[in-house]
Image (cartoon, rainbow, N blue to C red):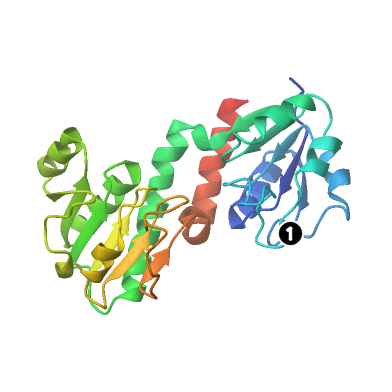
Amino acid sequence: MLLIHTIALLGGDRRQFYLSRQFLSEGYAVLCHRVPGIPDTASLIQNTVSQSELIILPMPALDADGYIRSDKTPLPLEPVLESAMPGAILAGGGMSSVQKAAASFDLSVIDYAQDASLAILNAIPTAEGAIQIAMEHTDCTIWKSRMLVIGYGRIGKAVAKRLKNFGADVCVSARSPADLAQIRAAGYEADHTGDYSKELRQYDCIFNTVPAPVLQQRHLDALRPDTCIIDLASRPGGLDSSCRFSDRYIPALALPGRVAPKTAAGFIHDAILSAI
């Protein structure tokens, strides 16, 4: 593996901006292309990546069309692979679709989204950002509100805990008996995801963390008109494709980069260095 002297950061959101600052403070040469808040180092992306032993893509790395995700114009991946020096490291969040192509150019791949510590820590700004959205889109306090959290994974646990700390009445839904037992043991009400035996009309806000169609049209029809649905799940999200979208449905992907980019960049920095 090459010794790393120069790092290229491509696209992304404000997390990439703070990553560049952190690596610069540690003595690395840092080159940027379409990173928010930083002028491009070179006019051509090829000139940026060809000098770099480590190339960092955002999280998630690619958009639905296979381009490098960017708050500006998305970047094509192919020129990056073709211009990178042999043996360079390509790091990004969600890199399964890149592995084969990168290997054909003799590039190593780090998928930092697979880092267990990063996944756990990222749940913190995700939960805080979700509650911020709820406060902005409802007309009541979190305290004494009725909240449903769908799913009891890392993010579901983080959201439920913080809602409870704010004084909300929290119900968490899951499917496995073990999760339902953990939910009750943690002091929450429990319900079964997809069935929702408890009256849905009671909820002021619903937080979905499950990337599957756990909300059907019949569920939406049972809600009050002012109930807010905050979807934290990765694509395809938690709403069935046949559902009629409403202005009370709020997709909330990549919250760490939106609400706490500096903190989230630190998590990514540590995940990348631990994988090298």
Residue at x-position 77% and y-position 25%: 104
Residue 78 location in percent, x, y? Answer: 79, 42
Residue at x-position 55% and y-position 41%: 268
The three-letter code of the residue at mark 1 reads Ile
Residue 112 location in percent, x, y? Answer: 56, 35
Residue 240 location in percent, x, y? Answer: 37, 57
In this rendering, the count of numbered labels is: 1
Q: Is residue 194 visible?
A: yes
Q: Is residue 51 visible?
A: no
- Where residue 122 sits, quadrant-wise, is top left
Residue at x-position 18% and y-position 52%: 195
Note whether 152 is above or below 139 in the view shown.
above
Note whether 233 is above or below 101 in the view shown.
below
Q: Nearer the viewer, residue 145 or 193?
A: 193
Note whether 229 is above or below 192 in the view shown.
below
Compared across the picture, whether 71 is left or right of 180 comes to right
Q: Nearer the viewer, residue 178 or 30?
A: 178
Q: Nearer the viewer, residue 126 or 244?
A: 244
Q: Residues within 10 Å of mark 1 (few under 14, many from 20)?
A: few
Question: Which quadrant holds the C terminus?
Answer: top right
Compared across the picture, whether 218 is left or right of 263 comes to left
Residue under circle 1? 38
From this viewpoint, which residue is outermost toward the top? 1
Question: Which quadrant holds the N terminus?
Answer: top right
Residue 160 location in percent, x, y? Answer: 24, 52
Note whether 271 is above or below 246 in the view shown.
above
From this viewpoint, which residue is outermost toward the front? 242
The local secondary structure at tag 1 comes to: loop
